[in-house]
Image (spheres, grey):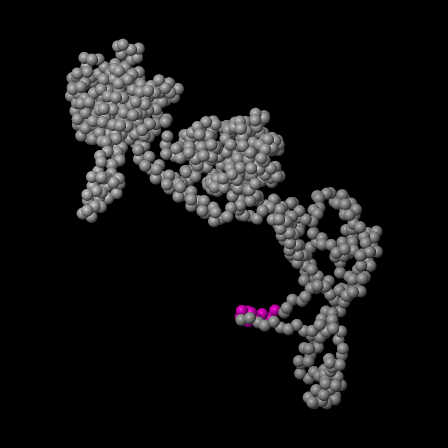
Amino acid sequence: MSVLENIYQTYARSLTELNELKIIVDGGDSRTDMKNIYVGPPAIELKDFFEEYLYQKSTVAHECGHLLYTPKEALKQLNNIFEKYIYNALEDVRIERALGNRYPGLAALFALQKKLYFERRKNWGNSPFIKKTFGIFWIGSYGKLPPALESDPEVVEFVRENLQLIEKATTAEDPMITLKIAKELADKANPNMNDLVEAEQISINIPATGRPQKAEIKQDTRMYKVQLPAPAPTNEENQTPEESQPKEENLPSNQQQEAESQNFQPSSQPEETQEPDEPEADDNSGSSKAEETEPAKEESNHLAGSNTETSNQEELEEENKIPADEGTENEELEETTEEVEAEEEKQEEPGYPNTTGEEQGTEPKTEEEANKEVQETSFNEEEFNYPETEKEEFREPEEPEMNEEDEEFPTDEPAEEEIDEISEEELKEALENLKEELSDERKAEIEEEKEIEGETNFDPQAIEEALKALKAEANAVYKKVQMERKNKPDYNRLNQQMKTWVKEELWQKRPIHKKHEAEFYTLRPEPALYKRIVQRNQKQIRELTTSIKRAIEARKALLERGKKYGRLDKSSIWKVGVKELNLFSRKNNPRQEKVAFYLLVDCSGSMGITVSGTEKNRMEIAREAATVFAEALKALNIPFAVTGYSSGSKCNFYRTVRFGYYDEDLPRIVNLTSGYGSRHGFFIQVAAKELSLRQEEKKFLIVITDGLPEDDAEYNRYGYRDVAEAVTDAEKMGVKVINLFIGNERDAKEIKKIFKHTINLHQPEFLPKVLGNLLAKLI
């Protein structure tokens, strides 16, 4: 079990109080079978170890929630895959909110994990049903929809319409309420065949327990309060002033005239209407209309009210015409203006008589007499009592102060005359302002209906503290994981490294192995068969565990005297007289040596021979010995590896148990089989080189074989010497080589000449004692 699996297992057992629960980090989907919790890879890319730790810890806690609160009875009542999907989404939210209420720290953990997924994940399915399911989950667990779902109007509308049902389902203490609402929402989602196709492609597993606990959900543990996009405005709110006016249909001319005559209703006081197709009037016509007198208006009203028998079209033409009186008045005004201009020109001509009001032939008045006459006839403004309204109306406005910028651009153009009539642009502007006011009122109503945007259920400081504590926890775990990963090499890289070493160094040092390349394979595991072998050899495993433990411990602790602290040493009391304080004794605590083992198993063809006096062949004995050895080392937490080997055109290594991958690799031992040759020297050289790369102080290479080296004719002549030199080279690398022999008695003497340390394996029951004694000598 890895460091992470051990930490997560302790964590899960404390949450669920299930002391047999195990955690397995594998490559499948995250799930639980009530006995094990499997932690699979995430659906997003994680950038560092903290994010990996956050994801895995929250996943373990989530699966623990299913083991606590999800009942098996509910799963039996789900009729189809759509109900299963909706129920899973609602139940996932319900159990997390229940755990968050039970353990407040988990509420922050789930919120941080959701925040990570909210920002990173982009794909939320293709079919509308799958998107709606994710919408249910996110609004229930986080309070907001991811951008990809928020931009889908169908998802937003579905969530908005069923928000109360979602809240009720995810806060229900009774899981059957959640089940009932899941069925209702599945019907409302209206799934189709495309939804079914995508749903069937996604595996879904809902774990459940036979004894669910009561889910107490009193506080909202989501990161945000419910936040949905504002609903789209209605068609009336979106219409411009032009669009809001009724549009004329393209009717034939006869039908159009009939429709206009039917819609026309005369009244004594006609309303002022704005015709959309009426051409804009020029400036002169606009000003003339603004200067109409009150009698003219009454006359036009009288004419409009009396012509009730004329058609609508004729009345429109009459309204557009200028009245006769108005035209005559304009002509008279033009003639008067021309006469005045002509008179002014005559005054400028020499000899033209003055026009100051005196008769021709009289003497002109002096300047003093003219001023006196003006004063007598001038209007005395103070003596006339103005009505207050008229006085204010005719008061000349004060001229505004001119800024420097205004003085830079003087203009001689006369100011435009004020027009009492409302222009079309002003009308449009007024309608726009009214629309904005109505829109603001509508927005205010929407804001009252929904929660304030961005408002959270967590105190920002509490989130920061939770994040800080989780990072500190992850850093402490990372140190342990980093230490473990040092002892858990990357075997893809290691295999390539060994292949290169063979070609560049081994072939140069041992030409006999030239053209023999190294090839690495991985065996298939057989958990059931391996478990039976372990059960059958429990006694040997316990004995070998004890024997190795004693062997790797340092010599018996010695009593050290003359210490300043410890237990009082009676033999040193005399030192009190000389004022010495080292009157105590202390025992040295025995320390455990750092050791590593590499078990190399011969898989040549001769290993298939049956051992005399037994019903087992040599390969079966080798497999049992490897199993006993591996289980003992695992119990002592000592790093080890098991590799089978055989030679042919290439030298084949069968990776059986790799350093650090014990739980997944141990069942591979049972698939070690016999075949081909045994080029012992080559495999000892490569295994010793691989073992020498490790950091342990003591390294042991144990070779299980049945005889002498054998391969091709050339190697058979020099095999003895090659193996002996390989053992010597291994010891130079700091690796001790031990041989477990299970061959013929006649070959035992020759084997002992090759290997310096040999143990006869014909009687496996004596292996623990003999090996333990040997290790005690070698350490």
Q: Which residues are magenta?
A: 405-413
Residue at horizontal 22 percent and vertical 27 percent from the top: 776
Question: Residue 94's spot in the image, x, y percent?
Answer: 54, 36
Residue at horizontal 73 percent and vertical 65 percent from the top: 291
Q: Is residue 407 on the magenta stretch?
A: yes
Can residue 631 be seen at all in this image of the molecule? yes
Relative height, residue 516 to residue 114 (above, below): above
Can residue 685 be seen at all in this image of the molecule? no
Left or right: residue 120 compared with residue 356 = left
Left or right: residue 72 compared with residue 696 = right
Q: Quadrant of residue 387?
A: bottom right
Left or right: residue 572 compared with residue 114 = left
Looking at the image, how many numbered discs can be counted on the residues?
Answer: 0
Q: Is residue 237 on the magenta stretch?
A: no
Along the line of sight, the residue nearer the viewer: 446 or 168: 168
Residue at horizontal 76 percent and vertical 67 percent from the top: 329
Question: Residue 443's spot in the image, x, y percent?
Answer: 62, 50
State the quadrant of the N terminus: top left
Q: Quadrant of residue 160?
A: top right
Question: Residue 79's spot in the image, x, y percent?
Answer: 58, 25
Question: Residue 111's spot in the image, x, y percent?
Answer: 49, 41
Along the line of sight, the residue nearer the viewer: 675 or 584: 584
Left or right: residue 1 compared with residue 159 = left
